[in-house]
Image: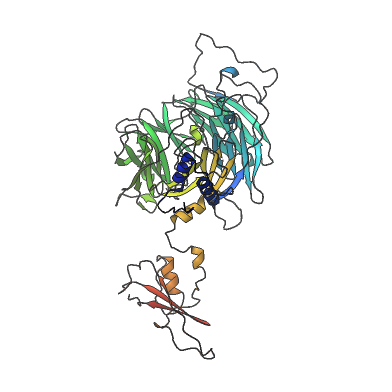
């Protein structure tokens, strides 16, 4: 009637839905205009870049004269416990099943072949996997992200991707950039060059469906839950397949690969030395620890402390079991021969533990009950985990993510919730609640607090995501930037500045940024006031030590040579954070600043007593 609307305590989206249901066209147009004004096709302040869908590459051709795969026979083939074979020549038919029997891209939607399935990054490179091909981008300081490699179109669906862009001090030098794609039991490995060309190194066969594909240094590792592990040696150019106990989890620490197995044991392999037994040429797999209850090790995390000695490092391992138990074991440098010792045990989950992360400040575990997360604070002394006061409970929350039933919302390997980030920094979870959602939520892994919400700039569904940290500039003093990479159903890749989101989300309301405090002067000589130690907070040291102590009350008489109508300006009160414990104050501290041109008078009230 009045053509006016009060939106207080009313959700605009719900009101728009009701207006569309009842067919109130003028109201629908106004509400839609309001939403368009709030959203921009250029994204928010966190939007960092947009990479359009690449062109469809040519199909991968088999080498002329290559033998075709033999039809299956009823006679079982001979099985060797381990074997070392050179890689197959490029452009040859893949071993195993015929091409027509392999997994093909789903044909339910036309857009499935062009949607992003997996995104991964390493240093200045990122790899984006589609249904039948993958594309690599490289970050250049002046021109940004540039496409440098595109694989040929394969005959099967890509399920796993691994990228290795740089290894410091590696034996391959500048030829250590490699990317691998896998489906079922077949793996294709390419070598990448900075000029944009790439060559196929070979095709490898694990023999069983693989569950994980990753690099440890220059060595390509493939693991399967059936109990097989495949390792490609970058130096000898050989593919080694080893039978072990059924594998449930893994983690890498330096050059060591740790495997959590179904029998409750943790095994390790030194992939850099690549030790082989002389009697049967098997890869040397050593048992490191066995769970007291012999429950299956379903999650594994290794943390190497900064302290080291001639006998080795102080190694900390956190693992979760199929019964929901979380344990922490430690390896002392002085007791290397005796193996790790049990340090702590937590029985807070009633479902199998699916993820675990031991970082510098937190211990994080996730169980199978709708991604239920439990976190603890870790107390350290000189970098090593300490028992006083020990690990204390911090938070309990869920990272709910509904799974897709028809397989059109992406790949399971591309929608891993995390946690993402370095172990010495704040880590985050990435949450996508609905399978076809166009937005994801970034949450702190320690407390579950929401940092930001990222919405696709073009409204397309998000099908894959990851967090990648790389240096944007090689200049001295430049800091690495953390980015959130989201792959979409239309084939595009969108980049978001997660470092800025962390800075904005971690700053309390009303707190000035560090750049806003840089204008405060610093004392060039000895001050007559008290100078606190360096451990004090920056705001106290800046306020107290910036100038000698002035008089308590600002002058009210006009300075000589000024206008007779001069009046003293009002004082500005700046409230400081809580004082250090060695200061005794009789009232809440305040910093009084008076502007008397050409002078700026600063007074501290009340004066500290120490």
| Looking at the image, residue 197 lies above or below residue 470 | above
Identify the residue at image location x=51%, y=52%: 499
Residue at the image position 33 percent from the left and 33 percent from the top: 351
* Image location of residue 518, percent across then percent down: 51, 68
**In the figure, residue 417 lies in which quadrant?**
top left
Q: Nearer the viewer, residue 466 or 542?
A: 466
- Give the percent coordinates (x, y) of residue 333: 39, 45
Quarter holding the C terminus is bottom left
Evaluate whether residue 477 shows in this view.
yes
Q: Answer left or right for 272 relative to 266.
A: right
User: In x, y percent, where is residue 10?
Assistant: 42, 50
**Left or right: 100 in relation to 527:** right
Q: Is residue 132 left or right of residue 551?
A: right
Q: Quadrant of residue 338?
A: top left
Q: Is residue 527 above or below residue 35?
A: below
Residue 178 image point, x, y percent = 60, 36
Which color scheme did the rendering employ for the protein? Answer: rainbow
Q: Is residue 417 above or below residue 93?
A: below
From this viewpoint, which residue is outermost toward the front?
A: 1
Along the line of sight, the residue nearer the viewer: 435 or 513: 435
Using the image as rendered, state which of residue 34 and residue 265 is in the foreground.
34
Whether residue 168 is visible to the viewer of this picture, yes or no, is no
What is the count of numbered marks? 0
């Amino acid at each position: 009637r009045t053509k006016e609307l009060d939106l207080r305590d009313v959700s605009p989206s719900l009101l728009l839905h009701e207006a569309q249901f009842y067919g109130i066209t003028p109201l629908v147009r106004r509400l839609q205009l309001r939403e368009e004004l709030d959203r921009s096709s250029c994204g928010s302040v966190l939007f960092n870049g947009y990479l359009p869908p690449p062109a469809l590459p040519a199909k991968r051709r088999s080498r002329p004269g290559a033998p075709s795969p033999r039809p299956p026979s009823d006679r079982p083939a001979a099985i060797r416990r381990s074997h070392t074979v050179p890689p197959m020549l490029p452009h040859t038919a893949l071993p195993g099943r015929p091409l027509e029997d392999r997994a093909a891209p789903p044909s339910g939607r036309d857009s499935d072949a062009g949607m992003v399935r997996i995104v991964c990054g390493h240093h200045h490179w990122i790899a984006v996997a589609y249904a039948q091909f993958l594309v690599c981008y490289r970050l250049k300081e002046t021109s940004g992200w540039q496409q440098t490699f595109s694989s040929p179109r394969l005959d099967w669906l890509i399920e796993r991707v691994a990228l290795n862009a740089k290894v410091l001090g590696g034996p391959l030098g500048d030829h250590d950039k490699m990317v691998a794609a896998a489906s079922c039991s077949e793996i294709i490995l390419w070598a990448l060059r900075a000029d944009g060309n790439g060559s196929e190194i070979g095709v490898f066969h694990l023999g069983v469906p693989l569950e994980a594909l990753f690099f440890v240094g220059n060595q390509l590792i493939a693991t399967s839950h059936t109990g097989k592990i495949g390792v490609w040696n970058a130096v000898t150019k050989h593919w080694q397949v080893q039978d072990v106990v059924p594998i449930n989890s893994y983690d890498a620490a330096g050059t060591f690969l740790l495997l959590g197995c179904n029998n409750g044991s943790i095994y390790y392999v030194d992939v850099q030395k690549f030790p082989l037994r002389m009697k049967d040429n098997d890869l040397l797999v050593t048992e490191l620890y066995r769970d007291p209850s012999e429950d299956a090790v379903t999650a594994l995390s290794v943390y190497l402390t900064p302290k080291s000695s001639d006998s080795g490092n102080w190694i900390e391992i956190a693992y979760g079991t199929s019964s929901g138990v979380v344990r922490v074991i430690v390896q002392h440098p002085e007791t290397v021969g005796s193996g790790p010792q049990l340090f702590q045990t937590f029985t807070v989950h009633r479902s199998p533990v699916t993820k675990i992360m031991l970082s510098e400040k937190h211990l994080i575990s996730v169980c199978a009950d709708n991604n239920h997360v439990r976190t603890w604070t870790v107390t350290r002394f000189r970098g090593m985990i300490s028992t006083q006061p020990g690990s204390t409970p911090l938070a309990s929350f869920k990272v709910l993510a509904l799974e897709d039933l028809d397989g059109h919302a992406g790949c399971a390997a591309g929608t891993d919730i995390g946690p993402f980030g370095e172990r010495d920094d704040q880590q985050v979870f990435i949450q996508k609640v609905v399978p076809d959602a166009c937005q994801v939520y970034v949450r702190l892994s320690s407390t579950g607090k929401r940092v930001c919400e990222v919405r696709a700039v073009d409204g397309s569904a998000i099908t894959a995501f990851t967090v990648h940290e790389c240096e944007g500039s090689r200049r001295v003093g430049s800091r690495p930037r953390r980015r959130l990479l989201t792959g979409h159903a239309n084939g595009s890749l969108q980049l978001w500045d997660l470092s800025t989101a962390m800075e904005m989300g971690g700053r309390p309301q009303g707190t000035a940024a560090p750049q806003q405090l840089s204008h405060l002067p610093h004392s060039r000589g000895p001050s007559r006031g008290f100078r606190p130690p360096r451990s004090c907070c920056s705001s106290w040291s800046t306020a107290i030590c910036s100038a000698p102590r002035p008089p308590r009350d600002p002058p009210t008489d006009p300075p000589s040579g000024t206008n007779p109508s001069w009046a003293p300006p009002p004082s500005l009160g700046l409230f400081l954070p809580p004082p250090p414990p060695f200061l005794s104050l009789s009232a809440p501290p305040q910093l009084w600043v008076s502007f008397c041109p050409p002078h700026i008078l600063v007074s501290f009230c009340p004066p500290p007593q120490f």
